[in-house]
Amino acid sequence: DAGITQSPRHKVTETGTPVTLRCHQTENHRYMYWYRQDPGHGLRLIHYSYGVKDTDKGEVSDGYSVSRSKTEDFLLTLESATSSQTSVYFCAISEGQDTDTQYFGPGTRLTVL
Amino acid sequence: AQSVTQPDIHITVSEGASLELRCNYSYGATPYLFWYVQSPGQGLQLLLKYFSGDTLVQGIKGFEAEFKRSQSSFNLRKPSVHWSDAAEYFCAVGARGYQKVTFGTGTKLQVIP
């Protein structure tokens, strides 16, 4: 299994509070991704990174920001959490060697009350 | 832009029976295609992938998939299902060199004795 950890694994927070989720990899892969998973929607890309300090938006980026100051860490921040952001969040990594194969972390279950 | 359709939301099969999960994609050129499996409460695990060459791809856990360009399909098959195969299965399509993958909405497989 690829060395990907996510923290926290579970979080309950209140509407309007900031939340930061962390993804850490030990594979030295160039690309990192944040997805959210919701019933009936599969996985939807929030943001991704193609290198340190290089990030881009995915299809559902509103209300989310990301940062990548080191190769191994990719942070997802909800500046002011809303109930619609209750979801399971997955981090993924890929080498970026033209194979597109992504490897996934265990997920973070976030509940916004 | 690429897209993926998994027409079956839920499938039930008997243990020992054969399985076929459908996946149709939309992409203008030859795509990268993937099947992932997700057990309850877990992250996604790669079952198999197609990049080029032989259109019949073998994966882990006894699964295989066939790329049919004329039908824009990449269906997943297994000749004899085991109870441990109960999970959710996701098909995904990627564009060469693009490093982003689009996931289908998933098919939940139930295995009955």
Image: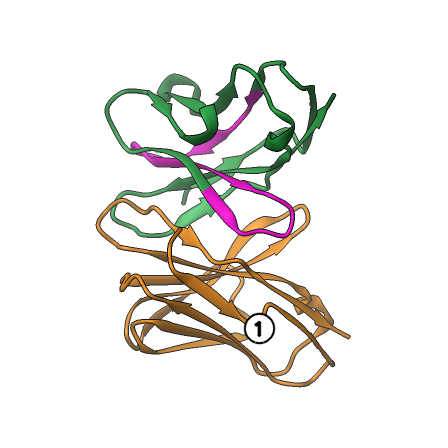
Chain colours: A orange, B green
Res. B31 image quadrant? top left
**Residue A18: quadrant of the picture:** bottom right
Give me the residue at 53% from left, 58% from top. A106
Q: Residue furthest right?
A: A113
Mark 1 residue crowding within 10 angstroms, few (<14) / some (14–19) / many (20+): some
Q: Is residue A29 magenta?
A: no
Residue B47, horizontal then vertical, whole percent: 44, 35
Task: Specify the subunit that label 1 lies on.
Answer: A
x 38%, y 60%: residue? A3
Whether residue A6 is visible, yes or no, is yes
Residue at mark 1: A8
Q: Is residue A19 left or right of residue A72?
A: right
Quarter that holds the C terminus of chain B: top right
Give the answer, above or below, for where B69 lies relative to A53: above
Question: From the image, which quarter does the N terminus of chain B lie in?
Answer: top left
- Taking the spot 38% from the left edge, 74% from the top edge, the residue there is A73
Q: Residue furthest bottom?
A: A17
Q: What segment carries the magenta color?
A: B20-45
Q: Of A10 and B35, which appears nearest the observer? A: A10
